[in-house]
Amino acid sequence: MYLTIDGLSKEDLTNSSTIDSFMLSSIDTIIFDLGEVIVDLHTHKTIDAFASLFQNPDFNLYNFHHQVSFFNEFEKGLISETTFRQHIRNSVQIQNISDEDIDTAWNAMLGDTPQKKLDILSELKKTHKILALSNTNSIHIKFINNYLSNRKTGDCLENYFHFAYYSHHLFARKPDKEIYQKLIALENINPSKTLFIDDRIENIKTAQELGMQTFHMTHPEQFYDLF
């Protein structure tokens, strides 16, 4: 765990009421990553789904720690959904794969978005500026919002934040400073009074360099320890 909330020690993590009291009195903005913080991720399921779709058990076009460049381009909004899918077909040299099959495999990594976490966000939103900052793409966001709407008519991720900033809208990805700087400017936030929560240490380090307080979430259940 990587914790840099001023005045709070790692030992304090055993006392969730201490964490809650301190955080709510020392910050005015909380920025949440989505994957593994709000939305459960199972990246191996997409790896397995692609391998099955392409009938190639050694398929390694995508994994969580290393992506072929066009995946990053898609997350930065530099290429369209159509171009993204065509890149996949070209990479495996199989042209007769449907858009639906590609999207199903690509979305396989997306697990539950626990309602309990969304309810906590709704409560936090009453007292703090609540933002999302996520490396994501249009296919994934549509899938998640359809999932939430099917569970509760009209529901979507954006309901639980004052604003959700997605990499494919900002044309930049974490951990590059550019995407953080765009959010800071757009929201006019004070980094020293901002708590940034993410599951990737490289993203945490950039937030620290920009003066934010941070919490490195190494397990999704830690969300409940914080709030």
Image (tube, rainbow, N blue to C red):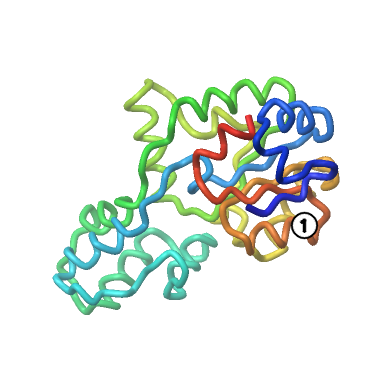
Q: Is residue 95 above or below residue 128?
A: below
Task: Please report the residue visible at 60 percent of the width from the left and 40 percent of the height from the top.
Answer: 164
Front residue of 1 and 214? 1
Q: Quadrant of residue 97?
A: bottom left
What crowding class fits label 1: few (fewer than 14 Cα within 10 Å), some (14-19), or many (20 or more)?
some
Is residue 96 found left or right of 79 in the rendered image? Answer: left
Residue 97 located left or right of residue 172: left
Residue that carries the numbered disc 1 in the rendered image = 208
Name the residue nearer the viewer: 35 or 2: 2
Disc 1 marks which amino acid?
A: Gln
Kindly identify the residue that appears in the image at 15 percent across and 68 percent down: 96
Give the residue displayed 30% in from the left and 70% down from the top: 88
Residue 227 placement (x, y as % from top left): 63, 29
Q: Relative to 23, does residue 200 appear above or below in the rendering? A: below
Q: Nearer the viewer, residue 160 or 7?
A: 7
Q: Position of residue 74 (x, y in %)?
A: 46, 63
